[in-house]
Amino acid sequence: PDSLRVLADTTGRRLPIGAAMAAEPLISDDGYRTLAATQFSMLTTENALKPQFVHPGPDTYDFTEGDLLADFAAANDMRVHAHTLVFGEANPRWMQQVALADRERVMTEHIRTVAGHYRGRVAEWDVVNEPLSPDDDGPDGRPGLREHLWQEAMGESYIDKAFIAARAADPEAKLYLNEFGAEADGPRWDALYDLVVRLQERGVPIDGVGFQSHIHEAGDHVDPAVLRSHIADLAELGLSARISEIDVYGESPSVQAGQFAGVLGACLSEPTCTSFSIWGITDRYGSTAEHDSYPLETGDELPWDQQLRPKPAVAALRDTL
Ligand code: XIL
């Protein structure tokens, strides 16, 4: 049968269908590589471009894995969604020890170097990943900002500065803010919406918002109609949206299939939803892997099983395209 990518490309929307990918299995596993190249038209750099891996020392950058992924994408006519320039949870130790007064310079230098290196080779960047606190810990009962070295030094303005630096380093790339848990109505979505409104009021060059769509338990189930309404709310602000990291843990294969298909359907129905990307391909490697400990932790969250056989989710995605 036709692949997800071929089906998507032969329908009117031509929606990019993506997956987070890693270098090791692309090198060592023929079956994984074949799925990657045939099923997907977009590649998200899973861990390779996180600050902890790409910028291991103050004067040391390691673009080896990112370059391999970018080359693989180019060889297979795939768009690259680069992840991520700024993320409080993925920093090397040296970066966390930078003096407060030097942090703005270090952050913007990091962005200039990494986004500059990939200029012309990546379609989009997650500029800031997960800016919101994981808890509803703000004074208004909504999540405040996630606390980390950049937020500590610059407050909310670190987000503005990161987007401005990314735009300068790669003027062609679409610039995204990526967040989890904002698919449903509630304080997380309200906080995210208000944040992007403030960014726009300050003239920050943001193009869109990524909905991670990690579905870990029944309580995370996505209501496609609500997700659609959030995508439409962003469209009214002139912002794109994308499904950036979907995976569905701990469900029967048919419930899992329904969640994947429902979220894809929401994206397909909204013209401003620019891509649908899964956080991994196969349960052989999973999506919670440690970059440095391949072979990786396995689970049940992805559309292809540990033998690389399609699960019901694949048929459901095909039927939705
Ligand atoms: C995860 C990776 O998949 C793991 O390999 C790594 O050990 C931890 O990070 N949201 C994100 C991603 O934006 O960066 C996270 O990736 C998964 C949750």
Image: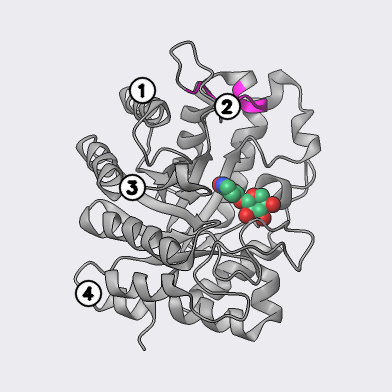
Which residue is tagged 3? 241
The answer to whether the residues at label 3 and label 2 have Cβ atoms under 8 Å apart is no
Q: Which is closer to the viewer, label 2 or label 1?
A: 2
Q: CA distance from mark 2 to mark 1?
A: 16 Å
The x, y position of residue 198, in whole percent, is 36, 22
Q: What type is the residue that disc 3 sits on?
A: Ala
Q: Distance between the Cα atoms at labels 4 and 3?
A: 20 Å
Render colour scheme: one colour
Instruction: State the predominant SS element of the stretch in magenta.
Output: loop
Kindly report the distance in space between the C-alpha atoms of the residues bearing marks 1 and 3.
17 Å
Q: Amino acid at mark 1?
A: Arg
**Label 4 with label 3: CB-CB less than 8 Å:** no
* 207, 312: nearer the viewer: 312
Residue 240 image point, x, y percent: 30, 46
Q: Residue at x 37, y 47 (%)?
A: 222
Q: Mark 1 vs mark 3: give the one in front.
A: 3
Compare marks 4 and 2 and give the one earlier in the sequence.
Answer: 4
Q: Residue shown at 67%/81% (left/top)?
A: 29
The mark nearer the N terminus, 4 or 3, is 4
Tell me if mark 2 has few (under 14), some (14-19) or many (20+) residues whose alpha carbon lies within 10 angstroms of its own.
many
Depth check: give the residue in front, 100 or 188.
188
Mark 1 lies on a secondary structure that is helix
Looking at the image, tell me whether mark 4 or mark 1 is earlier in sequence order. Answer: 4
| C-alpha gap between disc 4 and disc 2 | 40 Å
Q: Which mark is residue 11?
A: 4
Question: Which quadrant: the C terminus?
Answer: bottom left
Start-end of magenta stretch: 143-151
- Is residue 146 shown in magenta? yes
Residue picked out by circle 2: 146
Extreme residue in the front direction: 252
The circle drawn on residue 198 is 1
Mark 4 crowdedness (10 Å alpha carbons): few <14, some 14-19, many ≥20: few
